[in-house]
Image (tube, helix red, strand yellow):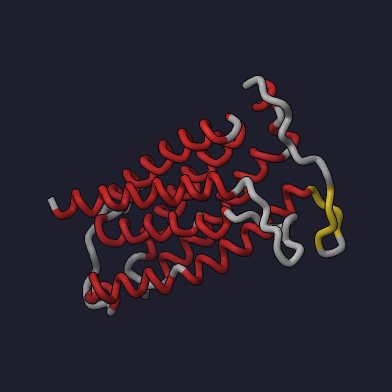
């Protein structure tokens, strides 16, 4: 019963994190001249990795996958309502693939020092999520999704200067987005470590190793 309550809370938290990210990723960060490099969604999305990793650490990858599937369904529905089908497909599939990759990377490292698994998983998952989302959502190569669903082309074909190179605006946005996710991934180690220290001190101090299947 206690585990069920915890998982219900994790599902709720994941749905909130995904919903917020799917809404905020549509808004550029209009500060310090970063509107072509960053969206607000980059600040909220890393919480999904925190929820995933804590669930994985405590209850194993099977439970973590259940949380991911719930977040995927919630994010897809919200995006489909608030945005175009193309953005919904881009955000939903990026979330699903990235979070499952997070679990895949986390499991072999779960017996290392407490911070290694969540950091490595967040970096690899964020990289996949960022590249996949921005390519599907804004690259002209995926404009066929808009055509198939009856929407006008939402691709961003314009170019911008990035470190002396002319690159598509969507690519510059993805670079800024990934940079913030890396920073947030490091920052998320603070609440992750604090929660482990308080609620799972033996795991935090490396005295025991939790059980959990290793398959994804």
Q: Which residue is at 26% across, 72% downward?
A: 203
> Taking the image as drawn, is residue 99 in sight?
yes
Pick whichever, 6 or 27, lies toward us: 27
| Residue 93 drawn at (x, y percent) | 52, 39
Q: Where is residue 162 in the image (x, y as percent from the top left)?
A: 81, 60
- Placement of 166 over or under 187, stated as above or below: above
Residue depicted at 67% across the width and 42% down the height: 135
Residue at horizontal 71%, vertical 34%? Answer: 154
Q: How many labels does the image show?
A: 0
Along the horizontal axis of the image, is 202 left or right of 100?
Answer: left
* Residue occupying the point 86% across, 54% down: 166
The residue lying toward the viewer, choosing from 123 and 15, is: 15
Across and down, in percent, residue 155 comes to 74, 36
In this rendering, position of residue 100 left or right of residue 110: right
Pick the front one: 111 or 85: 85
Asked if residue 101 lies left or right of residue 176, the reply is left
Does residue 215 appear anywhere in the picture? no
Q: Position of residue 158 (x, y in %)?
A: 83, 44
Residue 111 vertical position relative to residue 100 in the rendered view, above or below: below
């Amino acid at each position: 019963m206690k585990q069920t309550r915890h998982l219900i809370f994790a599902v709720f938290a994941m749905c909130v994190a995904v919903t917020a990210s799917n809404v905020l990723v549509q808004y550029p960060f209009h500060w310090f001249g970063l509107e072509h490099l960053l969206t607000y969604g980059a600040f909220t999305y890393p919480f999904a990795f925190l929820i995933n990793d804590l669930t994985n650490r405590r209850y194993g990858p099977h439970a973590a996958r259940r949380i991911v599937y719930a977040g995927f369904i919630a994010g897809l529905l919200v995006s489909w309502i608030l945005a175009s089908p193309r953005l919904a497909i881009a955000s939903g599939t990026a979330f699903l693939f990235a979070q499952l990759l997070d679990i895949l990377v986390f499991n072999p490292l779960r017996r290392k020092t407490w911070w290694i698994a969540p950091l490595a998983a967040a970096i690899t998952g964020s990289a996949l999520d960022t590249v996949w989302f921005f390519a599907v959502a804004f690259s002209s190569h995926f404009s066929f999704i808009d055509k198939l669903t009856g929407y006008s082309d939402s691709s961003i074909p314009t170019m911008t200067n990035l470190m002396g190179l002319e690159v598509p605006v969507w690519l510059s946005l993805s670079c800024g987005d990934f940079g913030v996710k890396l920073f947030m991934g490091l920052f998320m180690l603070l609440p992750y470590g604090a929660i482990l220290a308080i609620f799972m001190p033996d795991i935090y101090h490396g005295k025991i190793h939790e059980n959990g299947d290793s398959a994804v």
